[in-house]
Image (spheres, rainbow, N blue to C red):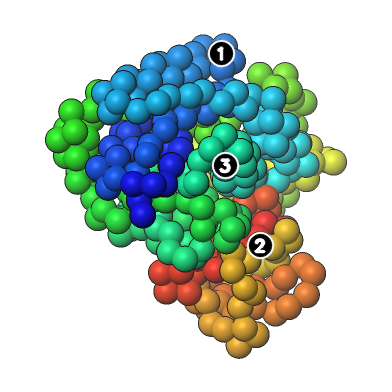
Amino acid sequence: MAKNQVVYVGLSGGVDSSVTAALLLEQGYQVVGVYMKNWSQDLPGFACPWKEDYQDAKRVAVQLGIPFKMYDFQKEYRQKVVDYMVAEYQAGRTPNPDIMCNQEVKFKLFLDTALADGADLIATGHYARVKDGQLLTARNVDKDQTYFLYRVTSDALKKTLMPIGEFETKDQVRALAKKFGLVTANKKDSQGICFVGKVGIKEFLLHELGAQKPGQIKDQAGHVVGSHDGAIFYTIGQRHGLNVGGGMPYYVVGKDMDLNEVYVTTNLDDARLWHKQLYLVDVHWINNSPAKEAVLQVRTRYRAPLVKCTLQSGKPLKVIMQDEARAITAGQSAVFYSGEQVVGGGIIV
């Protein structure tokens, strides 16, 4: 029964996790609020919002009359998420730190720490649904966050609640926050790198690695059309921030880290921008690996359209798509769906 189960809710200081705690309390769970302190360092020109978020989380806990704790995961977050992200960029790839944060911190470190601390379950404010160890898409299609959750294990999902995934609109969530009288009811959604704040990737990498070696930007004919301030800052499909003057817009189609060159095109139909197949490593299946003949749908980046696909087993795993997908990018994740169920995914090479 819910009233006998202790749930540790990850309170981020935002409206979604605040409503999560309030709903579970209303449903009869014994709720404990936990703020995960993953990052507290200010960056030049960007103040880390952790103190404000911590205070908001604490205020919500006081309003709801629930115990409140803080777990300090800064060391592990640095090792598992930040160091991984920086190393991937240095290798010329474009990683997704939010996916790694979910895999290593929220649904491993937080879960294990909470269970050892007396929790029966954990809960988060994610827009996703969990049922019998399966991960399902959120009712709110626009806010669905399952792309970032595909590396969570079935065992972890069996110990996790995500009540926000049942709501069809963000307005419904905010209306509940107002009904419960929560101080976070009108707080804006957070943006930027997971837990770090509004700092952009380029600014973060400059802080971590310092200024990078400049190099040439070349077009589809091999002509030098500009210069860059570090190849690590550019990703496939990128249009803005190239500083290549005049005429048609340019799009990044590739880069050579050894030569320190970035390659661009003005041709939106350039073959380097569109692919009907891709290859994956570090593949993770949430429940069981799909049957050989299974026809799945794949999402090749957050908010990219779903495309029908089939799989060819092997290492790396080959994915053949029914339609061409734009800007397939090494380091990003491709995530597989079967209807509303998230099957798994892997890292694009």
Q: Residue at x 50, y 46 (%)?
A: 120
Inspect this view and state whether residue 205 appears: no
Q: Is residue 165 left or right of residue 208?
A: left
Where residue 105 is drawn, which disc sits there?
none
Residue 42: image x %, image y %? 56, 13
Q: Which mark is residue 115?
A: 3
Q: In the picture provided, is 49 more to the left or to the right than 275?
A: left
Q: Residue at x 48, y 74 (%)?
A: 338
Q: Judging from the image, what secondary structure is the residue with disc 1 in? A: loop
Along the polypeptide, which appears first: circle 3 or circle 1?
A: 1
Q: Amino acid at mark 2?
A: His
Residues 321 and 62: in front is 62
Number of marks present in the image shown: 3
Which label number is shown at residue 42? 1
In the image, is residue 53 above or below residue 286? Answer: above
The residue that mark 2 highlights is 284
What amino acid type is highlighted by mark number 3?
Leu
- Mark 3: few, some, or many residues within 10 Å (few <14, many ≥20)? some
Q: Residue furthest bottom?
A: 293
Q: Is residue 111 above or below residue 168?
A: above
Q: Residue at x 56, y 26 (%)?
A: 71
